[in-house]
Amino acid sequence: MKKFFLLFTVIILQSCNPNGDCNDTFDAVFYCPNSFNLSFKLIDKNSNENLIQNNTISKDDINIIRENDNTIVETFLDTTTYTIYIENYISESETLNYSVKLSDEDSFNISATAKVINSGGCCASTVEISNIKIENTDFEIENNIYNIFIE
């Protein structure tokens, strides 16, 4: 078993390609996604308290639907900062549209333009986000995190 693990480790390390060439390498599949995060906090409009931190809303109450393909979006909750992260993986440039529901009620919409920028090689692409719009609520940006104000 130890020999198999060692062989597997060597194969993985050999297939990781530091120059960013795709050429059917392990890193092309697992280390080169075109990913980005949109992050926000849900803030009480009157008290300025974080609604997750004060237990008014739980992570289970938040449903985000990607309107482009009508799929439910996976989110991550940072329990230290009570920030919600929408994780995105795209293969080509597109406009993203999200509908956010809190406790099954439509609350607000988020849209953004995501542009894949290829700068050579598989692992050298990045995603540029622009034209972020949040509709049906007030918000402010603080350290690249959107504070969404909920009544």
Image (tube, rainbow, N blue to C red):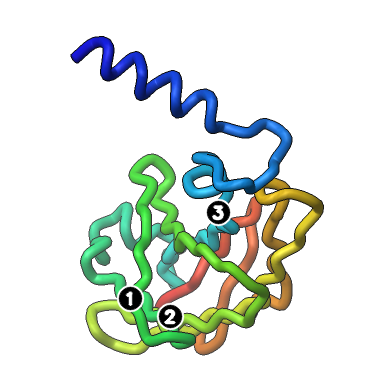
Q: Nearer the viewer, mark 2 or mark 3?
A: 3
Image coords of residue 32 (percent x, y): 58, 48
Give 47 or 101, whichever is nearer the viewer: 101
Q: Position of residue 6 (x, y in %)?
A: 34, 14
> At numbered mark 1, what does the secondary structure look like: helix, strand or loop?
strand
Q: Amino acid at mark 3?
A: Pro
Q: Earlier in the sequence, mark 1 or mark 3?
A: 3
Whether 31 is drawn above or below 127: the answer is above
* Residue that carries the numbered disc 2 in the rendered image: 66
Residue at figure coordinates x 47%, y 81% from the top left: 98
Between the C-alphas of marks 1 and 3, the distance is: 19 Å
| Mark 2 in CB contact with mark 1 (< 8 angstroms) | yes
Left or right: where 32 falls relative to 118: left
Res. 117 mark: none
Horizontal relation, residue 38 to residue 77: left or right: right
Identify residue for label 1. Answer: 72
Mark 2 or mark 1, earlier in chain: 2
Tell me the residue at 81%/53% (across/down).
Answer: 119
- Residue 33, which numbered label? 3
